[in-house]
Image (tube, rainbow, N blue to C red):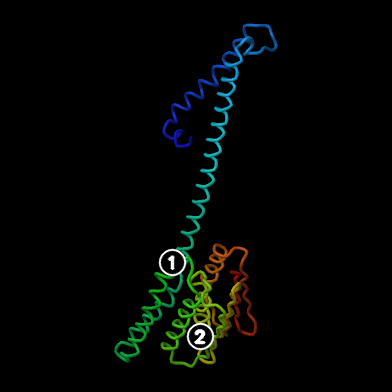
Amino acid sequence: MIQWFKQNKRIFILISFISLAIPLLWISYKIISTDKDSFVITVNWPSSVVFILLGYYILLILTILGIAIHWLVQQIKTIIDLKNEKKKTELIHLQTQVNPHFFFNILNNLYGLIDRDSEKAKQLVLKLSDMMRYSVYEGLKDTVSIQEEIDFIQNFISLHQMRYKKNIDISFQTNIENNDVNIVPLLFIILVENAFKHGVEVLRNEAFVTIELTTTNSEIKFTIKNNFDPTHVTQKGIGLENLTRRLELTYPNNHTFTTRTMNNTFEAFLSITI
């Protein structure tokens, strides 16, 4: 019926208009031309004709209702699709904002290493290539395995250890019950990058970053701590706002994200129900 309506839309509208107009015009004529307050249109009509007309108008009304309901459902579906498309576009935009600061710093270090330590520069290029490939390709997927995220963070830490001459106390502990657990990509790296950017890069000595990641079949917990220099003023970045928005879009009502600062130490905690 819907397909026929799409193909014969004008004909159906014309038939419906005529079918509704005829009885309305007849009733109007009777009201104007007679003094009666009420009358029966089908008086003295054969029963077969009455049943045919009644069936026709019932079918017509049901058809119009069916088409109206179908149109309403299509409109609702279109609105939902537009919202989902907007959500997807926003997520892609947010994900493309991840790590520009880090990659710029690594490229600067690479430039200085090429002549001074070519072997170290080659290792750095390979690790950087793996990270960029992950960010570009895996980073646009809906989900990745938790192990892939762990490998990405470990590469990030290794690159930082290669580029810094100072000693850094870095601890990354994991307790993974199920490696098949999936998660939205590039969530944790925002917090890790912030820890290095606002802590390790600023402090001359005794810098530390402590990371713990645990997973079960139903929950992922991520905790990160780093110290910082309270006298060093930094501009507010988009990292935490980016992370907060992505969590709202991908894990609505299924996550907890908190941060706190105490004794020159910044701590962030993220829990996701999966």
Q: Nearer the viewer, residue 149 or 164?
A: 149
Q: Which of labels 2 and 1 is toward the front?
A: 1
Would you call the spot at circle 2 few (<14 residues within 10 Å), some (14-19), or many (20 or more)? many
Q: Residue furthest front?
A: 48
Q: Secondary structure at mark 1?
A: helix
Q: Badge 2 is on which residue?
A: 200
Q: What amino acid type should be assigned to the residue bearing mark 2? A: Val
The residue drawn where x is 45% and y is 63% is 92
Give the x, y percent position of residue 33: 62, 6
* Left or right relative to 97: residue 214: right
Residue at x-position 50% and y-position 76%: 189
Query: In what quadrant of the picture does the C terminus appear?
Result: bottom right
Q: Amino acid at mark 1?
A: Leu
Q: Secondary structure at mark 2?
A: helix
Q: Which residue is located at x 44 percent, y 75 percent?
A: 101
- N-term-proximal mark, 2 vs 1: 1
Q: Nearer the viewer, residue 194 or 151?
A: 151
- Point out residue 51 in the picture as x, y percentages from the top left corner: 60, 20
